[in-house]
Image: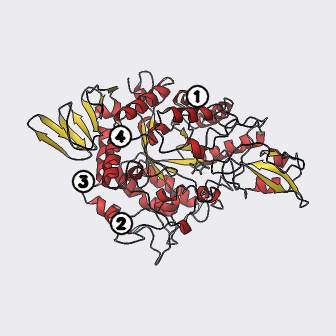
């Protein structure tokens, strides 16, 4: 398989093999000593990010928002929430990032707005069938007096996807659709104003110099406007199960349920992205958009064709278990899925919606060893990698007391699902106790509490420890940019007799071997060790690879 990002006849855009660092602004760094992360904190953190070797940052939403879903409930998509700073701060961030060679990607949330967005406020105060209501999905209820929701669609966060409103005269009235929290009404993408407004938002940030977009819920914009009941109303909360082997029958059934359904991944979505692409192209050919769309691999290419968008997250990798044959299958299918349209694959091991990778792979020393080993697999693959803040520190999920939980998933599921707070705790920068240099505010009470054990995981401590996870990431990110085999070498799996080993070539002289066994193995290939995530030794019979360890060899 040749590296699709360097296929003949295709010039190589920066994003096709970038290392992109996801910043969750409220938890990255506090720059104004109020206890919450902000844009000034991101500016302060740029030297750190440059030292890590990333090519771009993706900022989760920092727009005005009541913060019912940590900013993914946007009340004004073309402004900065004062809690995160100002537009001037943002402009300075872009300028300073660019000076350091770091590009800036912002999150676009087109599927829904906040209930406090002026459009929704207007809709609530307007009559049935009004222009204001037609920007959303307002329907009459079922039952004798409309007391039942219009259909059986479920919110991804749990419960019905419909909420009934009081009409301006105080009587119970219509229902509106929200695939997420009730404070996140879905927009009606058949409405021309909605389309035009999104284009204005893209233009607004492009004019401020951003290099790209991450498109939230990119598979959800178009809905079946006949609003049929679903035979099996799948909530994404169920379809995104992190304990599910992505190659299992159950996982593929769940994904199939999302493909081209009444509310997800409908063919007409691509018309929207064609318009976006044309706009982005008018800003030059190095702007990009990466879509968040949990679709089966065979649907992925529709989002990343020449006339739609640029990249799609390969989410099967984000849930892949520590199993060599499943990894092989997931990697092969992910590369295949996008190579048909000449698009580069992407690899993410975690994000703000998932458990941290260390926790997912077993927690403790074993989880950390596997997470480091998986990182060296991901970083050696063709295409782009996305690193979620704190992943480079090998952080685990934090056990959050129930009284401190913030995630709407926790509230909407009445405590049945813990939600995503455990992976969103403010980063530990320095010092031996909370707030670990995250903020200068004395006695700060952070929005999510940091654990006592983080003293050993701070950036300060890891910076000077040659074998820290931070320095492993620095080394791998540097090598993937400088070693010709890793930069542009063809990708090919290497056959091994041992089903517990995952091995592949990059170019003529790089071999990557991951040992997923809990014991030492003889390496099936020999050569000079470029990098290893764990213990290795050279014995009488050549190289031996320690448990849960990946090694990069120059053969
Ligand atoms: C985002 C989540 C958010 C949801 C609703 C997701 O795809 O990544 O964090 O809760 O969209 O906007």
Q: Residues within 10 Å of mark 4 (few under 14, many from 20)?
A: many
Q: Residue at x 35, y 40 (%)?
A: 379
Q: Position of residue 555 (x, y in %)?
A: 20, 30
Under circle 1, the secondary element is loop
Q: Which mark is residue 21?
A: none
Mark 2 neighbour density, 10 Å: few (under 14) some (14–19) many (20 or more): few
Tag 4 residue: 379
Which residue position is annotated with label 2? 453
Nearer to us in this view, 320 or 415: 415
| Mark before the other along the chain sequence, 1 or 4 | 1
Q: CA distance from mark 1 to mark 2?
A: 45 Å
Q: Quadrant of residue 386?
A: top left
* Left or right: 124 in relation to 554: right
- Which mark sits nearer the N-terminus, 1 or 3? 1
Neighbourhood count class around disc 1 (C-alpha, 10 Å): few under 14, some 14–19, many 20 upward? some
- Whether residue 70 is visible to the viewer of this picture, yes or no, is no
Q: Give how far apart the Cα atoms at labels 1 and 4 are.
A: 25 Å
- Badge 3: how crowded within 10 Å, few (<14), some, or many (20+)? few
Which image quarter is the N terminus in? Answer: top left
Q: Which residue is mark 1?
A: 302
Which of the two labelled residues, at mark 4 and mark 3, occupies the earlier sequence position? 4
| Front residue of this view, candidates 505 and 401 | 401
Q: Secondary structure at mark 4?
A: loop
Foreground of the two, 59 or 283:
59
Gap between marks 4 and 2 measured at Cα: 28 Å
**Badge 3 is on which residue?**
467
Residue 274 location, x and y as percent? 64, 31
**541 and 16: which is toward the camera:** 541
Question: At 65% from the left edge and 36% from the top edge, which residue is drawn?
Answer: 264
């Amino acid at each position: 398989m040749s590296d699709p990002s360097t296929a003949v006849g295709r010039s190589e855009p920066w994003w096709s093999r970038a290392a992109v660092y996801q910043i969750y602004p409220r938890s990255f760094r506090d720059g104004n000593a109020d206890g919450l992360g902000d844009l000034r904190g991101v500016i302060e953190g740029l030297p750190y990010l440059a030292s890590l070797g990333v090519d771009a940052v993706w900022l989760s939403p920092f727009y005005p928002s009541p913060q019912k879903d940590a900013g993914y409930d946007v009340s004004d998509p073309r402004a900065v929430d004062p809690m995160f700073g100002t537009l001037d701060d943002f402009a300075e961030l872009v300028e300073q990032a660019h000076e350091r060679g770091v590009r800036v990607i912002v999150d676009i949330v087109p599927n829904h707005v906040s209930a406090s967005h002026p459009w929704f406020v207007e809709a609530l105060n307007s009559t049935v069938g009004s222009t204001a209501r037609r920007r959303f999905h307002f329907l009459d209820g079922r039952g004798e007096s409309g007391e039942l929701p219009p259909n059986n669609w479920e919110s991804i966060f749990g419960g019905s996807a419909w909420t009934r409103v009081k009409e301006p005269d105080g009587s119970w009235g219509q229902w509106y659709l929200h695939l997420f929290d009730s404070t996140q009404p879905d927009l009606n993408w058949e409405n021309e104003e909605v389309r035009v407004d999104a284009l204005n938002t893209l233009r607004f940030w492009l004019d401020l110099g951003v290099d790209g977009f991450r498109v939230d819920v990119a598979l959800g914009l178009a809905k079946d406007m006949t609003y049929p009941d679903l035979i099996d109303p799948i909530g994404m909360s169920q379809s995104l199960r992190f304990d599910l082997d992505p190659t299992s029958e159950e996982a593929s059934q769940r994904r199939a349920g999302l493909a081209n359904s009444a509310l997800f991944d409908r063919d007409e979505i691509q018309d929207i992205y064609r318009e976006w692409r044309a706009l982005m192209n008018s800003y030059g050919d190095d702007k990009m958009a990466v879509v968040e769309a949990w679709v089966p691999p065979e649907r992925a290419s529709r989002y990343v064709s020449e006339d739609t968008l640029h990249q799609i997250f390969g989410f099967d990798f984000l849930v892949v278990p520590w199993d060599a044959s499943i990894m092989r299958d997931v990697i092969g299918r992910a590369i295949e899925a996008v190579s048909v349209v000449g698009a580069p694959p992407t690899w993410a091991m975690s994000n703000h919606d998932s458990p941290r990778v260390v926790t997912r792979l077993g927690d403790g020393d074993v989880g950390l060893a596997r997470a480091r080993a998986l990182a060296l697999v991901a970083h050696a693959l063709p295409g782009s990698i996305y690193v979620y803040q704190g992943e480079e520190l090998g952080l685990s999920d934090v056990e959050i007391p129930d009284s401190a939980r913030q995630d709407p998933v926790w509230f909407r599921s009445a405590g049945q699902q813990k939600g995503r707070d455990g992976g969103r705790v403010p980063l530990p920068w320095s010092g031996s106790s909370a707030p670990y240099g995250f903020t200068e505010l004395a006695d700060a009470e952070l929005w999510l509490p940091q654990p006592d054990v983080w003293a050993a995981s701070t950036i300060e401590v890891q910076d000077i420890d040659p074998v820290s996870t931070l320095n492993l990431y620095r080394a791998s990110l540097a090598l993937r940019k400088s070693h010709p085999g890793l930069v542009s070498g063809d990708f090919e799996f290497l056959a091994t007799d041992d089903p517990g080993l995952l091995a592949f070539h990059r170019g003529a002289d790089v071999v990557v071997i991951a040992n997923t066994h809990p014991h030492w193995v003889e390496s099936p290939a020999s050569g000079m060790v470029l990098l290893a995530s764990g213990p290795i030794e050279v014995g009488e019979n050549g190289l031996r690879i320690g448990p849960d360890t990946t090694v990069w060899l120059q053969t």
